[in-house]
Amino acid sequence: MYIGILSRSIQLYSTRALFRAAQARGHRVRVFDYMACDILVEDNKPSLIYGAEPIPEFDAFIPRIGSSFTFHGVSVVRQLERMGVTAAVHSDAIARSRDKLMCSQYLVSEGIGVPKTYFSHDVEDPKFILDMMGGTPIIIKLLEGTHGVGVVLAENYKTAETVIETFSKTGQKFVVQEYIKESGGADIRAFVVDGEIIASMRRSAMEGEFRSNLHRGGQAAVYKMSEEEKATALKACEVLGLKIAGVDMLQSERGPLILEVNASPGLEGITTSTKIDVAGKIIDYVEKIHVAKTKLSV
Ligand SMILES: Nc1ncnc2c1ncn2[C@@H]1O[C@H](COP(=O)(O)OP(=O)(O)O)[C@@H](O)[C@H]1O
Ligand SMILES: [Mg+2]
């Protein structure tokens, strides 16, 4: 097969791991910087221009769209889909999961637990929101943040009001969210490929920190998920239409609550802590969908 990886750079751990896993299975593989792909929309002939040439005809592609490049990245993925190239992750599914508010709206509609979350376009009175949400401590987070940046735990009312005012006055999109204290600064990451949990880990925040992100000094360890947690993670992927995803959840008194679902989950933390060949399993899945498609078109 000829596999394309849409990524900003081959230097990134996950991109390199996928590249090597594809090569090791005898595939031809190339990394395309999706930000350098131009889109040409034309009657019956959608195309992508890469380095002043039409993009090569590969069989399937794996999108690895960074959160700061969602608009262009998703547009490129959509274009490749229209060109008939098999996508490992669909453009609509990436868009649905990327924005934390949108993601939680989809999830609750199917009965999946999420922390109580409030969104306002125009905050006139932070006090109203805080009262509505049951006061402090409370979480305030930017909608498109990542790696824990833009997630604030406001311990008291004054701090919460100040953060809400600051985010609001600087034109940021954010949510005010119930603080799940009993999760104790830890979250669970389930790595899902093709409707199966192939690896899972528990990340714990470092001393004095509530965010468990590895980028914020969190530590990861192998974790055996409960049946309820597994079912929740798989259901979330099903609802969002994601075949490859990192599902993050908090353990709460009312069961697992989904924080976010990542459509381009990092491979380094999960591979290092679980020793599972996550990249290899992703390539196995790409092979499977390619074979299925080829059979269909015969
Ligand atoms: N409502 C919450 N209650 C308790 N901890 C939270 C809550 N929201 C986020 N956290 C902690 O902060 C971390 C980062 O939050 P998250 O929403 O995943 O943002 P990011 O996309 O930046 O990773 C989580 O992994 C978790 O440890
Ligand atoms: Mg996170």
Image (cartoon, helix red, strand yellow):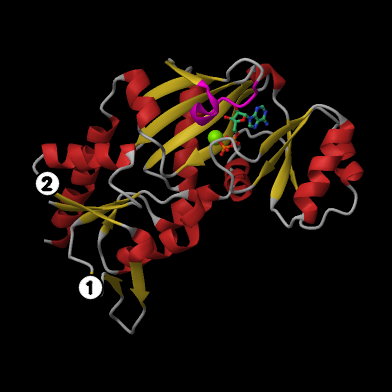
Amino acid, disc 2: His
Residue 85 in picture, x, y percent from top left: 25, 61
Determine whether, in the image, residue 134 is placed left or right of residue 280.
Answer: right
Disc 1 to disc 2, how far (Cα)?
21 Å
- Residue positioned 69% across, 25% down in the render: 180
Above or below, comparing residue 172 to residue 152 in the picture: below
The relative height of residue 195 versus residue 84 in the rendered view (above or below) is above
Return the residue at label 2.
27
Magenta segment:
209-218
Binning the other alpha carbons within 10 Å of mark 2 as few (below 14), some (14 to 19) or many (20 upward) gives: some
Residue 54: numbered disc: 1
The quadrant holding residue 251 is top right
Q: Is residue 198 visible?
A: no
Q: Quick check: 184 left or right of 270? A: right
Label 2: element kind: loop
* Closest to the observer, 263 or 69: 69
**Which residue is at a point 11% across and 46% down the rendered structure image?**
27
